[in-house]
Image (tube, rainbow, N blue to C red):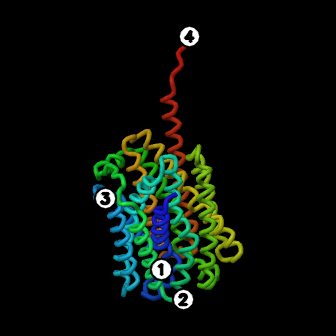
Amino acid sequence: MPLALLALAISAYAIGTTEFVIVGLLPTVAADLSISLPLAGLIVSVYALGVTVGAPVLTALTGRLRRKPLLLGLMGLFVAGNLLAGVSPNYETLLVARVLSAFAHGVFFSVGATIAADLVPADKRASAIAMMFSGLTIAIVTGVPMGTWIGQHFGWRATFLAVSLLGVIGGLGVAALVPGRLSQPPAAGLADQFRVLGKPRLLLAFAITALGYGGTFVAFTFLAPILETITGFSSATVSLVLVLYGAAIAVGNLVGGKLANHRPVRALAWLFALQAAVLFVFTFTADARIPALVTLAGMGALAFANVPGLQLYVVQLAQRHAPGAVDVASALNIAAFNLGIAAGAFFGGRVVDSSLGLGATPWVGGLLVLGGLGLTLLSGALDRREARRAAPVLQPA
């Protein structure tokens, strides 16, 4: 594997850290800016919405730019967004900073995946893309707990300044290691994306992604406040708990990929059912430390286990219903993941602000995941009906 992939992985690590580290810092940010937890939760929603909008729109608008200069520009925007977050004097400035970082995030992973595939022979492209995305997984395991620890000891602004330094290192790696001559794939315009959005089966798949994946974020967004105020862990211990959660996510992602290789719909149905069950159980175990940790390990393992299956299923559907726009459908599913994060964080904030309170976020998230399960079963039934219609009718001899 070429060293250029390491530069892409470091950049992905920085981007993954800035996306999820805010979860561990919500109580700190809320206290420092004198805002409520639901308002702090909107920081997660705004970032995810920035990725949702920025990924398809900005990818279309920048499709004709040369790949390496575009990648360097994206890392520059990412660093600028995190520097602004690191000096934000108020809540409004922090929101603007998060949107800037989110715009860079959406296009980076869209463009970075094509660059990673271009750097290696055809038979190693999947491994190259996986290596780039490993930066995102490692960020959840190490970057988020480390960033939370920095924020708790030196202030949340220090975390974003540290992440901007990671962005600089990633950008320098891209400048030094990524070759200037890269293939220029045909640009997918906004019209191509609207055509995909006109396919009912793909819209159903995007809804499955948003509900099934996003439901977990009703509780995950407010995980640090839950652990501190309900479970009774100290703020210093929360960063250690996030290591456990991140490690479970990494394992679950690998296992979920293996389960979904051949029958993604069946795997997704089981994973969503288990995830909903774990979220319901967490409602009752959150106030006891050991049961809470055991439940959280299961919750983490299942939270991202559905990602490979969801992406594979969308690609399979696109090959049948929009064969000329498989890449566009895949990119729009990335937007659906982030739409789910935004919706989950938003609804979580409404639950916290209501009479239900913080402790209700797990079971409300479980209900959303059950919605994703219902849509998955519906889509599977439609697949079987299509298969029966496509089967040849045997005529009697």
Residue at mark 3: 66
Q: CA distance from mark 3 to mark 1?
A: 42 Å
Q: Which mark is residue 15?
A: none
Mark 2 or 1: the one toward you: 2
Q: CA distance from mark 1 to mark 4?
A: 72 Å
What residue is shown at x 50% (from left), y 55% (from top)? 128
Q: Earlier in the sequence, mark 3 or mark 1?
A: 1
Q: Earlier in the sequence, mark 2 or mark 4?
A: 2
Q: Residues within 10 Å of mark 4 (few under 14, many from 20)?
A: few
Residue at mark 4: 397
Q: CA distance from mark 2 to mark 3?
A: 42 Å
Determine contact: label 3, label 1, CB under 8 Å.
Answer: no
Q: Residues within 10 Å of mark 2 (few under 14, many from 20)?
A: few
Q: Position of residue 55 (x, y in %)?
A: 37, 60
Determine contact: label 2, label 4, CB under 8 Å.
Answer: no
Mark 3 or 4: the one toward you: 3
Image quadrant assignment for residue 107: bottom left
Image quadrant assignment for residue 241: bottom right
Residue at mark 1: 37
Q: Which mark is residue 153?
A: 2
Q: Amino acid at mark 2?
A: His
- For the residue labelled by badge 4, is the local secondary structure a helix, a strand or a loop? loop
Q: Is residue 350 visible?
A: no
Q: Earlier in the sequence, mark 3 or mark 4?
A: 3
Q: Earlier in the sequence, mark 1 or mark 4?
A: 1
Q: CA distance from mark 2 to mark 4?
A: 81 Å
